[in-house]
Image: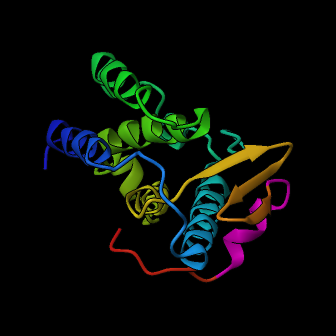
């Protein structure tokens, strides 16, 4: 796949999500998906830090190569679309970051690390009707809370869920 094809595929994947909030149907799965996102982010932070400090919900693609970004008009179109729905700022930021990630996902500077896609767990969370919010150093997903200050510990944990990417 070309970068353009991968980026457009991600764009359409995000547009296909039903952003109208639903009742939580599987809180354990949503919590596992967030834990998996934290694990993957911590793995990326481990290989990219200290030269590129990463925290939860950081733009990992920019840490890999800040010069390679999704087309600004495409990003604007995505954010304009998301503004129609009850999507919080962090969730919008994650969707934008996933779009930037799609541009570099298959590039050698990413593949050299042989790490999983950091955004896949959150995209699955959204596709399954889940949501999360951040507040005062905590992540709340389906009634489960995660402290952001100890998120690096997730790098040492086994996968919480098995995903294709």
Q: Is residue 49 visible?
A: no
- Name the one closer to the observer, 13 or 111: 13
Residue at the image position 60 percent from the left and 57 percent from the top: 41
Q: Is residue 61 left or right of residue 143?
A: left
Quadrant of the rendered image containing residue 157:
bottom right
Q: Is residue 92 left or right of residue 18?
A: right
Give the percent coordinates (x, y) of residue 64.
50, 41
Quadrant of the rendered image containing residue 27:
bottom right
In the rendered image of this protein, does residue 132 appear above or below residue 96? below
Quadrant of the rendered image containing residue 36:
bottom right
Magenta stretch prevailing secondary structure: helix
Give the percent coordinates (x, y) of residue 40.
57, 63
Q: Which residues are magenta?
A: 148-157
Residue lying farthest to the front in this orientation? 23
Give the percent coordinates (x, y) of residue 25.
51, 73
- Name the one closer to the observer, 86 or 11: 86
Residue 149 on the magenta segment: yes
Give the percent coordinates (x, y) of residue 136.
86, 42
In the rendered image of this protein, does residue 107 appear above or below residue 127? above
Q: Is residue 142 visible?
A: yes
Residue at the image position 50 percent from the left and 80 percent from the top: 161
Image quarter where the C terminus lies is bottom left
Residue at the image position 40 percent from the left and 51 percent from the top: 110
């Amino acid at each position: 796949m070309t970068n353009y094809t991968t980026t457009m595929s991600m764009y359409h994947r995000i547009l296909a999500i039903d952003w109208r909030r639903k009742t939580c149907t599987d809180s354990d799965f949503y919590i596992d998906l967030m834990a998996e996102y934290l694990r993957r982010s911590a793995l990326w932070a481990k290989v990219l830090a200290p030269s590129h400090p990463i925290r939860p919900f950081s733009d990992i693609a920019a840490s890999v190569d800040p010069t390679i970004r999704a087309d600004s008009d495409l990003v604007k179109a995505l954010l304009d679309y998301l503004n129609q729905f009850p999507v919080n700022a962090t969730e919008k930021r994650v969707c934008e970051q996933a779009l930037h990630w799609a541009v570099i996902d298959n590039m050698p500077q990413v593949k050299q690390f042989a790490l999983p896609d950091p955004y896949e767990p959150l995209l699955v969370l959204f596709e399954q009707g889940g949501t999360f919010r951040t507040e005062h150093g905590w992540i709340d997903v389906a009634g489960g809370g995660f402290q952001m200050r100890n998120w690096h510990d997730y790098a040492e944990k086994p996968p919480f869920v098995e995903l294709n990417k």
